[in-house]
Image (spheres, grey):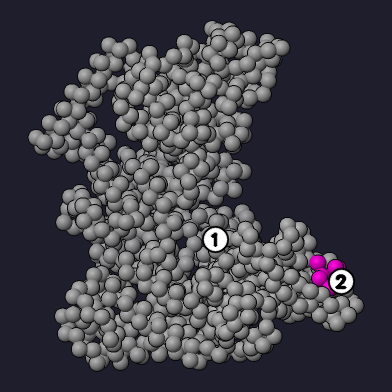
Amino acid sequence: MTKTYKKKLIEVAIPLEAINAASAREKSIRHGHPSTLHLWWARRPLAACRAVLFCQLVDDPSEYADDLLANDKTRKAAEAELDAREKKRELDKIEGKAIPLDEKPLSVEEIAVELERKRLFTIIEELVKWENSTNEEVLERARAEIRRCCGDELPPVYDPFSGGGTIPLEAQRLGLPAYGSDLNPVAVMIGKAMIEIPPKFKDMPPIHPGGKERNHYRNAEGLAEDVKYYGEWMREKAFERIGHLYPQVDLPREYGGGKATVIAWIWARTVPSPDPAFADVRVPIASSFVLGSKPGRETWIEPSVDKAGKTISYRIRHGGTTSEISKAKSGTKAGRGANFRCLISDTAITPEYVKSKGKAGEMKQSLIAIVAEGKGRRIYLPPSEAHEKLAISARPNWRPETGLANDPRNFWTVDYGLTTFGDLFTDRQLTALGGLVECLQEVRDRIVSDLSTHKLSQDKMPLQEGGAGALSYAEAVSVYLAFAINRSVDRGSSICTWDSSPKMEALRNTFARQSLPMTWDFAEGNPFSDASGNFSGNVDWVVKAIERLSPAAIGVERQHDAQTVDFPDGTVISTDPPYYDNIGYADLSDFFFCWLKPSLKSVFPAIFGVLATPKSEELVATPYRHGSKDSAESFFLDGMRSAISNMARQSSKDYPAAIYYAFKQSEVAQEGISSTGWATFLQAVVEAGYAVVGTWPLRTEMANRMIASGTNALANSVVLVCRKKEASAEIITRAEFIRALKRELPPAIAELQAANIAPADMPQSAIGPGMGVFSRYKAVLEADDSPMTVKAALQLINRELDEFLSNIQGEFDPDTRFAISWFELHGSEKGDYGAADNLARARGIAVESVKHAGIVESAAGKVRILKRDELLDDWDPNTDPHLTVWECCQYLIRALENDGEYAAAMLLKKMGADKAEAVKDLAYCLYDICSNKRKDAKEATSYNALIAVWTELTRQAASIPDHEMTGNRQTAMNF
């Protein structure tokens, strides 16, 4: 059938390594990152979304090969490259180097296409760097390519599950009309703050009194400056009203005396002692008494019990014995979970007891330490009765009454009597946060007043007459200040704990994970201090994020469900849907919604006119909400099928859709790559009318290269590349599907290997071409004429992948093939000589041959493969008379792990191109054996790490001068 669209770059090749590296590095970026505007769960990295969007819109060079050759400069470059390759090929023949039998010389046209892809890859590699996210020169190069491929009319990009807003933000950055929608009000406000508000006030100067004179304000810089100014005004007003609740503390003489600002008050929850003799004593339940753990400067709380007086007091200790510090780390814990011991009677405090007292309203809190600001350090002080009484005296005017979800997986406080969001805050915290909310309306009024007296001309301040524009600007500033309040909410609940680690000694936030855990000892921060979590600091985080927003096109964010939302004509779909049952967004976001509602209801009455975030339509497979796991799965599948059908029906046929899927590692570990969540999601995609034409694994975890790249965990998420299924799609049988897989999957896997896809990511990557075969048909029928499920198709795809990796073994030397089989059976353990002899003879060799090659040890009727640390110290492939692929692989890994990348690159160059490619193939085979057959995660990591850095090794090897090489097989590898 004639193709009616141009194939895009994302359907053929992307610079995955550069994208993953930039995405992982982005995890370490804090100041200025859009994620710091407002917390949202499981955001996709900016770098990945930016690159994916570019590759969705830019044509693959194979679509304009004729135009490339029509350009004299391009043609000459391709011809020169072709000539250089042919000369290299002839030289390899003369030197006797092995040339793969299936290698065919490329044409001038193919080389021109290859060089053009490299040019586009260079643009992407620059585009994904964090430093270039506001670099107009780099961004404009990318925009120019998009305009070249899309014409003057740039297509709109729509994300119907916009969540944290990353995809619409990156579409806007690339100059594309950006649209997003979400059912969740909190997500909608994040989207409005990132893509809808900034374009309205682009390049506008600030309006606050006494502002610094600047000639030019770019993008949202003026807006950011006003947010900072009015945020400080808010803080001052709030402090005037409630500052007395946050007194300074008296410093002892050893710290120089005087007063100091409190950073945090450390509290422990208490329950009545379970011992009847001490039932009137409130005893602490604390996970830890450690405040600081810097070696040599350990600081901890030591409780002192007076049984006669029935009191417990606390003092601050520094240093101490190993036993004392270890005991302090355990607090009053007596095991896992809510198991504690009574300090005054040593009676067990069981989880059931704590729950009963919590539900009866008898769980309180006691102050156990105070943290104050010192010169270059924290000062830890014992509790003050005056400070404790003052905190308890606070009387909030309002508290959130929204109930917490009865979801035992994610909400752990309900069983302990903390059943509403208001219960998660102390009265003083509620008073402070409520005071900030009350100041927000005053800020809006103040901005309108300041604008009425502002002297800037209308060309610099394009606001509407009659005050409407002024109100709009005041409301815009208040959105960002409401976000600053919500940052304070995240740092201002009784779920926050004190981080005593050596590098921190600071207040943790509420959402250290995607749940609301129960905490026993907690830290109450001072919003008016200068320490982490204070209100001014939270305003600064928001301001820095606003300053880096680059609204290069319009942005629209709406509240709507994905199943029925209408898209603009010609929409390009790029979306990050919820992932089966990973995260309960609606339940979690109520924590923030209940504070945004009083802050912004007057500005957005339609969005905040509900009691809580919508739950019934949220597309997550939540068993507690639907009664059972099966019902939850059916709800998710039906809803996701409907949502994706809506995308397929309305989106442009000219561009592929990109759909992100995040893997839940625990689920995949139990069920493999055909896990329920993944298979269910893919089933919805296929049934919605999409054909999957590609899958790209994205790694976004921040870590050291060797550890991160070498890990055996699956990629954090996968991008599905989808096209609308042809109306004329056929129905085929299972046998026909398997034949098509055997025909099409091996060359596709070979291409993935050539692109150095990590072995851990290969199963995910192979799904792309495999599902491309499955999903292009209307149906694949089983023997009983029932439609084949996606789960069954995934299992067949995985089987073909295993078969491909097994077939690679036939291309290795006999000694290596023996070693693979023996390793699969025994690992590095001993096996009987007789069995080894039979295995060797089947490969046309003897055990002595493998022993002579330096692969195995044979003695006393036993055979064992040598471990890497047992191999020769002075081995050199140029002087080894019995060189095998097995040795090359093991020595290369040892060099990489022990001596680093340069040493490994030097060794790789010595091996020569023929052995190098074989080593890479062997690493894929051995990874598969270790991870799927032997279940040896540690050994599998070594093979995965080798492939993960293969591109870098070959780059370094190619740069090593020939004169540094020695030996009989000296070769300058042309990587």
Residue neighbourhood size for the residue with mark 1, other residues' Cα within 10 Å, grouped as few (<14), some (14–19), many (≥20): few
In the rendered image, residue 61, in percent from the top left (x then y), is placed at 22, 39
Q: Residue at x 81, y 71 (%)?
A: 343
Q: Is residue 13 above or below residue 925?
A: below
Q: Is residue 715 above or below residue 442?
A: above
| Secondary structure found at label 2 | loop
Q: Which image quadrant: the C terminus?
A: top left
Position of 81 compared to 906: left or right?
left
Q: Is residue 214 visible?
A: yes
User: Residue 942, which numbered label?
Assistant: none
Q: Residue at x 27, y 76 (%)?
A: 222
Give the residue number, with chain letter if any, for mark 1: 503
Q: Which residues are magenta?
A: 341-347
Give the residue number, with chain letter if any, for mark 2: 345
Q: Amino acid at mark 1?
A: Lys
Q: Amino acid at mark 2?
A: Ser
- Precedes in sequence: disc 2 or disc 1: 2
In the rendered image, residue 759, in percent from the top left (x then y), is placed at 48, 35
Q: Main secondary structure of the magenta part?
A: loop
Asked if the residues shown at circle 2 and circle 1 are in contact, with their CB atoms under 8 angstroms apart, the answer is no
Query: Residue furthest toward the right?
Result: 277
In the rendered image, residue 260, in percent from the top left (x then y), is placed at 56, 81
In the rendered image, residue 912, in percent from the top left (x then y), is placed at 37, 21
Q: Residue at x 67, y 88 (%)?
A: 386
